[in-house]
Amino acid sequence: MSDPNKPSPMMQQYEQAKAACGDAILLFRMGDFYELFRDDARVVAEKLGLTLTSRDKGSNPIPMAGFPYHQLDGYLAKLIKLGFRVAVCEQVEDPAATKGLVRRELTRVVSPGTVTDHELLDPRAANYLMAIVEDGRGQKLRSNTETGTIQPNRRFGVSWIDVSTGCFHAGELLYRQLGDLITRLAPAEILLADSCTFAIPETGHEFAITRQADWASTFKHAEDNLKRHMSVASLEGFGFDEDLHLSVRAAGSIFNYLRENQPSVLDFIDQLQRYTTGSAMEIDQATWRSLEITRTIRNGQREGSLFGVLDRTVTSMGSRQLAEWLAAPLTCLNAISYRHDGVGELVEKPVLRKEIRGFLKATYDIQRLLSRISSGRATPRDLSAVGTTLSAIPDLKAKLATGTSQLVQDSFTAIDPCIDLCQRLASTLESECPIHTRDGGFIRQGCNAALDEFRDLARGGKEWIARYQQRICEELGISTLKVGFNNVFGYYIEVTHQHRDKLPDGFIRKQTLKNAERFITPELKEYEDKVLSADQQAFDTEYQVFCELREAVSARIQSLKCNAQAIARLDAIAALAELAATNRYCRPCMTDDATLEINDGRHPVLDITQPLGTFVPNSTRFDDDHGTIHLITGPNMAGKSTYIRQTALIVLLAQIGSFVPASSATIGLTDRLFARVGASDELSRGQSTFMVEMSETARILNTATPRSLVILDEIGRGTSTYDGVSLAWAIVEYLHDRIGCRALFATHYHELTQLEETMSRVRNYNVLVREWNDTIVFLHKIAAGAADRSYGIHVARIAGVPGWVNRRAEKILQQLEGTRSSRPAVGLAANRSNEIQLTLFNSPPHPLIEKIRRLDTNHVTPMSALEILQQWQSELLETETPATSHSSPNMP
């Protein structure tokens, strides 16, 4: 008697698969369904709303849930979006041809960073899997939860790959640079060793974290795997010498993860590119967020960001290429000029630009198609898309032949029409192909003789039966004879009892009915065997032709990858040219010094999103005469923040190879771009607004160089007036004396404007305002000199603050400006006109000090001195007010 507690052979098979896939959700194929059991069933049923049932409903029921096999892509997408790793266990034998238990195997483990299915990916964004390994030398890193900090100069190995395109990078970074890289790349998944204890820097970006065994990222293991896969004796040819162990370890960690979970994609990976700091402009995460380069601060959407207005590409590949350029602005003059030349040619040749973009619109995302083709999971529609793309290339290549810029010429050289492959795809595949091979009907008639025969046999069954029935009726003289079919007996000849004796030898009885009998003949049986197997044979033959075609595409994968890269680059350049031509951008003159001159510059986002002609351009100039540190004063809403941001964005655009929104521009190379704009708490890390502000400012002061561009907005506003002014003052001095970089500093601290008198490279600028009928008009124009007022109450009125508050504020402001009171109180009385503000700089003398100075002590008796002291004490008590705010009275 069998043990009721012993699992069935099928469940034993499930347990083995579950043990092999670790913490991944296991989708176990059982016939026409994917089933989940135990905890997987409970979790997925709750998250996706599946019905939770049970298997073996006796004393030991097993929770169970499932869905039809053809709904795999939809459910897989939902699970990946929720951050799960998902293992797929398929039936690898035909159940109809197998006796006993069907063999099953894990075919893939899909995680957020290893997705290749186009249904699961954003077509216009890369999908990165990242690995981080720590330097094992010296003292162990401590986590943020223990100390709040990690040694900022500790080195880490970092590697990342987009499995869907095969782009594979590795490099070494300092800890302070990790958060910047994560912010720019926005990986979907990060791999860490089991022993790693460091805290990944906070970026606000969501990603899955997957742990690996420590041995997976050891140097020897990683190096051997990478060399074997790349078929090289050394990794030095890829730029990884013996000093870059951390880079190799990180890359090896990714390779091992893919080999265990998605081995089929490894054939697509044939390059490993070294990432080095300094080869691109460094942009920290605070700057990336403040400048809204790829996402807006308000809602985190692409629309309204710099990338949102730049992206005029017509292909997904071009969009991803442009995003990659934006994340890594160039610092090499020749490389920048190479792109500028390409953009310039397409600006000057609008017909060529239009034709190129028209041809590109006819192409598909072959970067991601090739990933699926190389992994053996391509569909008929994927191959059809490759064929359609190749068919557009000859005309595109012909147009590129007329190009004169090096970039266009290089694109012409790189593109291979693959004419033989294109012709084979066109002659083999139908013009409209289904998504799945199981749907059939995607191979053209006449492509394969055997396939045509099987199809004809399957389609011609009814015609043959009709002809056969007519012939038998005529030969036997039985007009009521008929040929039929059912699923039990197959084809048969039915004859009533009264004509039974007319049947010749060779008619074999199959079934007796009440009024008739059914027979089969050898001829009919032979045809039955052909017809019943024709559909399956047609399917098998068609699939065989498809596999041969897929292998033919795989054999040309290197040429196709070059085509994809050239198309992506062309699309990005053409998009920048379209933007420049449409919005009157100019080509910047790039120099290898600290020059920065922008004439009639415009904010690249607001210039497009605001009504045409409403944005007010402004010029910027840094040199010996105009200074290298500009202090910008003026009221809120006047445009200070817009102005300093637009300057930073124009520099960024120039160094990705784009033209810029200005009438002319000369831009010296910038190695690092810093922006400290806006205020935000990070309560989860126990940091206040001011703490965040100071942390980001410290990063700037500790890492900026003379080649950097720094923009600062309202530094020091999160603390008292004295503290804030003192910090802002000292920061300007540090930028001027210690760093010597270019900087734009927007502030409401008018005391800082005095720095122009003592620092040779500091200049004052202000945003022009005009007063009209007790209101103000913002001119949004930057002019030399300092602002004399902040107009905070006017801004409050515009913002909708109640009238009583505005009127009361105006009275208080008049009193404060008249008396220069030091510490305004909440209950400031209307008659308190004797208060004086003790400012940090050039403080006026207190009235009592003047009385003391004028007192003739030689003619004051001791009794008179006591009376005078009592009088002065009384005056102090009458005018003294509790300190309730250290904010400047000029602060809006």
Image (spheres, rainbow, N blue to C red):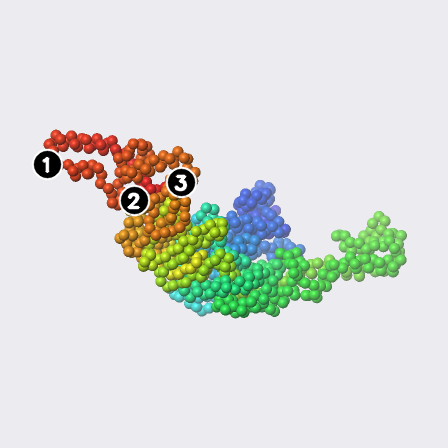
Q: Earlier in the sequence, mark 3 or mark 2?
A: 2
Number of the front mark, 3 or 2: 3
Horizontally, is 22 left or right of 741 in the view?
Answer: right
Residue 610: percent from the left, percent from the top? 48, 49
Packing grade of label 1 (10 A; few <14, some 14-19, many >=20) is few
Amino acid bearing label 2: Asp
- Residue at the limit of the structure toward the front, as seen here: 773
Label 3 to label 2: alpha-carbon separation: 37 Å
Horizontally, is 599 left or right of 867 in the view?
Answer: right
Label 1 to label 3: alpha-carbon separation: 57 Å
Residue 287: percent from the left, percent from the top? 40, 52
Q: Relative to 45, is 182 above or below?
A: below
Using the rendered image of the protein, determine whether residue 201 is visible from the camera's viewpoint: no
Mark 1 and 3 residues: CB-CB less than 8 Å, in contact?
Answer: no
Q: Earlier in the sequence, mark 1 or mark 2?
A: 2
Residue 858 image label: 1
- Say which element carries label 1: helix
Residue 201: percent from the left, percent from the top? 40, 51
Which residue bears the numbered disc 2?
723
Number of the front mark, 1 or 2: 1
Amino acid bearing label 1: Asn
Which residue bears the numbered disc 3?
773
Packing grade of label 3 (10 A; few <14, some 14-19, many >=20) is few
Label 1 to label 2: alpha-carbon separation: 42 Å
- Say which element carries label 2: helix
Q: Earlier in the sequence, mark 1 or mark 3?
A: 3
Horizontally, is 732 left or right of 463 in the view?
Answer: left
Packing grade of label 2 (10 A; few <14, some 14-19, many >=20) is some
